[in-house]
Image: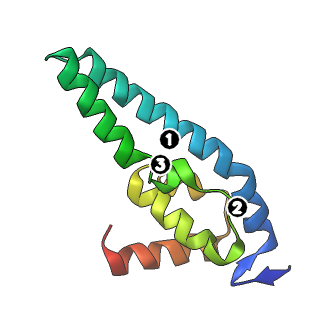
Amino acid sequence: MSRVQGVNERDWKLFRSKLPDWQEHYMDKLNHEYMEILNGEGNPSDKFWALEERIRQDKRDTGVIVRGASRSNMLFIIMDLIQEGAIGVEDLAEFSEELRERVRGFMERNVL
């Protein structure tokens, strides 16, 4: 089992295969939230500006912008995705117990 930056090869490959789907799912969730803003009560101009502000904030999320992930930042990306609500701990079920334990430990120390 190859290991670089504390991440085994299987986890790394699994992460790379899952990341695009996680991002698509997250962006679909955001799109639904945007529709709620547009379909809500209020003036069209207020909804427009509320949506513009929300998109400006969301486009900085890891679930939207992550590209070129590397093994050295994989765990940080996973933690960001969890914090943003792009994925849940249950989405890590196929990963190694070691990786899941590292994530749980980080979450306990940082109280997500």
Q: Which residue is drawn at 29% across and 19% down?
A: 38
Report how far apart the C-alphas of labels 2 and 3 lie in the structure: 18 Å
- For mark 1, does the 10 Å Cα neighbourhood hold few (<14), some (14 to 19), or many (20 or more) residues? many
Q: Where is residue 48 in the image (x, y as percent from the top left)?
A: 27, 25
Whether the residues at callouts 2 and 3 have beta carbons within 8 Å, the answer is: no
Residue tagged 2? 68
Q: In this image, 102 relative to 58: left or right?
A: right
Depth check, mark 2 against mark 3: the one in front is: 2
Q: Is mark 2 on a helix, strand or loop?
A: loop
Q: Position of residue 60 (x, y in %)?
A: 44, 53
Residue furthest toward the left? 42
Q: Nearer the viewer, residue 63 or 92?
A: 63
Task: Identify the residue position indicated by label 3 in the image.
Answer: 86
Q: What residue type is labelled 1?
A: Tyr
Cβ atoms under marks 1 and 3 closer than 8 Å = yes
Left or right position of 8 against 93: right
Image coordinates for residue 98, horizontal then vertical, percent: 63, 77
Mark 1 and mark 2: Cα distance apart in space: 18 Å
Q: In this view, does 71 lie to the left or right of 41?
A: right
Q: Residue 109 is drawn in which quadrant?
A: bottom left
- Tell which of 69 and 3 is nearer to you: 69
Which secondary structure, mark 1?
Answer: helix
Residue 40: horizontal and vertical position, in percent? 21, 18
Q: In the rendered structure, which amino acid carries the disc numbered 2?
A: Gly
Tell me the SS state at disc 3: loop
Residue 79 vs 33, above or below: the answer is below
Circle 3 residues within 10 Å: few <14, some 14–19, many ≥20: many
Q: Which sits earlier in the primary sequence, circle 1 or circle 2?
A: 1
What residue is pinned by disc 1? 26
Q: Which residue lies furthest to the right in this view?
A: 1
Residue at (58, 44) in percent of width and height: 23
